[in-house]
Image: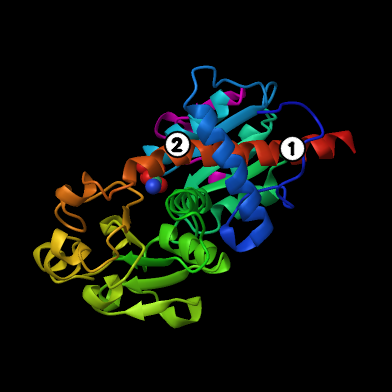
Amino acid sequence: MAEGAGKPRILKGRHLLGVAELSIDEITALLDLAEEYASLARRRDRKLNTLRGHTHINLFFEPSTRTQSSFELAGKRLGADVMNMSVKTSSVTKGETLLDTAQTLNAMRPDLLVIRHQHSGAAELLAQKMSCAVINAGDGWHEHPTQALLDALTIRRHRGKLENVTVTICGDIRHSRVARSNILLLTRMGARVRIVGPGPLLPPNAERLGVEVYHRMEPALEGADVVMMLRLQKERMDGAYIPSEREYYRFWGLNEERLKLAKENAIVMHPGPMNRGLEIDSSIADGPRSVIREQVEMGVAVRMAVLDALARNLETEAAA
Ligand code: CP
């Protein structure tokens, strides 16, 4: 992987707040760069100096295993100084606001700030108030752009393209920022996207998203290239959206019989964390068609590509 100045600009914007702001060319360039980083990650000499001298802060107000650890690894593999801010032991617990916390961190002159927050729009707010590049690692029900990018990379590696690939997204679509970002990205790249789930867990006016809406799993899975299961997000439900977990599994869970309806070489995805035995059977999650662990691997590569792309813009700004 070539290092040094003069690398081509990949992203037009200063921040990565959502897929909605990305063009087809930007998405393709990010995926191509991530593919290079994915190859690099399998080598022993995988540490680079691309972000040497850059300070990268992870600020997570919601729990995370995959996103936070992969951003940390991505920053470290690129040579950045990475700080994981522990929100639980910070002055947030004494009532300090999001903005005061952000402005305090801003005074330490970071270059890149990765934020996850329970409120939609939190990343955008910080982008307006901070002088560094801001990356949205999930804001409320709104967007989770790096998850959609890593999902797209995983699909592209298995299908060779995104155009005309049929992707069925199943389950709790309404509360899912992963579904929202995936729908935006996959439809923009020419994939055919189907969504399916219980009526109360589908977004209002779902047809306007450019997807096909199904109300039963069987027709939604018929001939699919990709089956993307979503976690039932109990923490975002303020009422009874499903009669019972047993019934949810019966009608909406992915089992071997249902998976037979998809293409023989269909892949099964899940952003994690999984509710095994609720939205997906363990035999499928750990089975030969599951690419769930590959998604995690691609997460590091995609986050390296995003950090690199935004750092290039900072360098261009500094040189101007
Ligand atoms: N997919 C995802 O965002 O996982 P984490 O919540 O573990 O980061």
Name the residue type under label 1.
Answer: Arg
Residue at x 14% of width, y 64% of height: 257
On residue 68, the disc is 2
Q: Confirm whether residue 205 shows in the render.
A: no
Asked which colour scheme the image uses, the reply is: rainbow
Disc 1 residue lies near ligand 1 with CB under 8 A: no
69 in the magenta segment: no
Camera sees residue 203: yes
**Would you say 56 lies left or right of 313 here?**
left
| Amino acid at circle 2 | Gln
At x 62%, y 33%, the residue is 105
* Range drawn in magenta: 78-98
Secondary structure found at label 1 = helix
Q: Confirm if mark 2 falls within 8 A of ligand 1.
A: yes
Query: Residue at coordinates 28% horizontally, 73% vertically from top-left?
Result: 222
Looking at the image, is mark 1 or mark 2 nearer the viewer?
1
Mark 1 vs mark 2: which is more N-terminal? 2
Residue at coordinates 50% horizontally, 58% vertically from top-left?
143
